[in-house]
Image: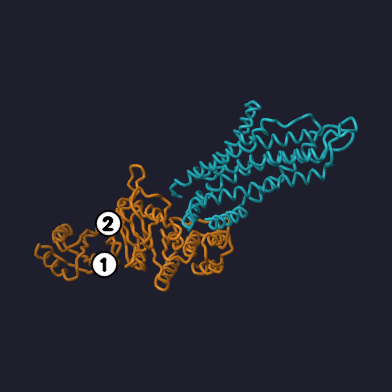
Chain colours: A cyan, B orange
Amino acid sequence: MAGRVIRLTRAELLKLVHHPFFLAALGLLAAATIFGAWGQTAFFGTKPTVWRGPHALLIFAWGAKSGLKMASFLLVIFGSLFFAGEFDKGTIKILLTRPVTRTEVFLAKCLTGLMLAGLLFGAVLALSFGFGCLRGDLGPVWDSEQYISTTSADELSAHAAKAVRLSAAGVVAAVFLGIAVSTFVESSGLAVAMALALFIGMDLGLGFVREDQARYVFSWYPSYAFEILRSYAEGSATRWRSTIDDRMTWLYVPGASAGFFAAVGYVFFRIKNILA
Amino acid sequence: MVAVLETEGLTRHFGRIRAVEDLNLRVEEGDIYGFLGLNGAGKTTSIRMCLRLIRPTSGRIRVFGQDLRSNFISIMSRIGALVELPAYYPHLSARKNLEILRILSPGVEAARIDEVLELVGLGPRRNSAVRTYSQGMRQRLGIAMALLPRPRFVILDEPTNGLDPQGISDIRNVLRELNQRHGVTILISSHLLHEVEVTCTRVGILKAGRLVEQETVEAILAKAGTAVRIISDSAERALAVARALPYVQGAASDGNGAITARVAADKRADLNAELVKAGVKVSGFVPEKTSLEDYFLSK
């Protein structure tokens, strides 16, 4: 079974990198990341300090926050195309008339989704960090008026690592949302529209819930994590919410969401009659 | 004879619609089996069930003597299929499309891709994006996809759709060669009855989801007998006389004052005598060969 899943995943990756939207997606991701990092400083300025320019991790946080938002949207779109795109073109018949089972096809698609999520996540972090280092300074965060360091470089690095850790699962859950929708909607356009509407609806819905309730929505974590990192890097008074750390909701909520989406998608795909 | 594909009581209902009912299909090793039926007769649904794309409501499917459900991987590694319209990734070339399929088919070497593309006549356009292909070229690609894994059993649903006469002849030759030189068993679903007659060794005729005939083409043509075109002073009376005779297997007016009656060669003289005895003045009595099409339409 493992061998067949690996072969299927190879085929999926081949299809993915040749997908007409793939390069456009990478371009959009880079643009969103750079624009987030550069645009925030250019248009809104930074907290004034007489001692230095913006901190590199501040620019990194802006870039990552904006880039990961775009990455989540792109993952929802690609996830929605994984099955619906095959139904649309009828190529699902080709896959399922080869010596592979539906479970293996589903696992390969999920694995490809995880790899894509890893690629986009890594690309955003690398790009925003690289841009941050080019345009800002590393080291401790200095007080804006007195020549004292408010946060050491080591502390700030730990906060950055935590922000990255807190964001990862939320991004992964986005791709599974797309996959779940694409198993029961056979038109790729409709699948993308439905999945995006759900995802955007969740994002908008966050504005209407109390802050302590927002932690139950997986798409909240990347924005939250990099907003806190931004505050630390800016020297503002802030702290991580203990409820998130103590209960590890940053892992459980997106993890459970991804698991739920995967289960729904798998059941739909298993019982589906292929009439494409 | 060993059955390559055998179904027992295969049934599929879509709500109240009985798409396929109690289908007992038997495709023997070495057959080129023609699967015939009007649109909506249940051919594609049957084929989809035989490939587990659709779950049957009831019934059993055995392929190469094994139960399809419990031996799916082993069976599918020996099957090539083209179901209804050919499916492909339009932004990729034919080579890349086949490369994806090759990855999914263990034991198929890269050189096989060019081999099948040459076989179906797509060699010169192998690197063009499939979206730039004509309908006929796409159909050829679909056939190449079915043949890529060197299958022992090929299922082709309407393989000559969209092909020009040269293309139809080329594909017919490819299928015959596969069958005769490499012993590949082939099931073809088609509307082109002449093609089926000249290509297939056995046929199954599906009507409203039920198999109404399953025989060798030779036996069907022999059973159909030969037809006689009768020109007389009264087509109505000639028709009534012919239809009343037990050895006449079917008679119909052609609308031009003549009738066509299906009758064995040794009974033609008797039919003529009966017509004369009934007072019908026969001015023309022309024997004609009955085709599979005539037989199919009379079912």
* Relative height, residue A195 to residue B199 (above, below): above
Earlier-in-chain disc, 2 versus 1: 2
Furthest-bottom residue in this view = B181
* Residue type at the position of mark 2: Val
Mark 1 sits on what residue?
A: B219
A82, B200: nearer the viewer: A82
CB under 8 Å between discs 2 and 1: no
Q: Chain of mark 2?
A: B
**Residue found at x 67% / y 47%:** A120
- The percent coordinates of residue A96 (x first, y second) are 47, 54
Residue identifier under label 2: B212
**Viewer-side residue, A152 vs A61:** A152
> SS class of the residue under badge 2?
strand
- Horizontal and vertical percent for residue A84? 52, 46
- Residue nearer the viewer, A215 or B129: A215
Q: How many marks?
A: 2
Q: Is residue A252 left or right of residue A93?
A: right
User: Mark 1: which amino acid?
Assistant: Ala
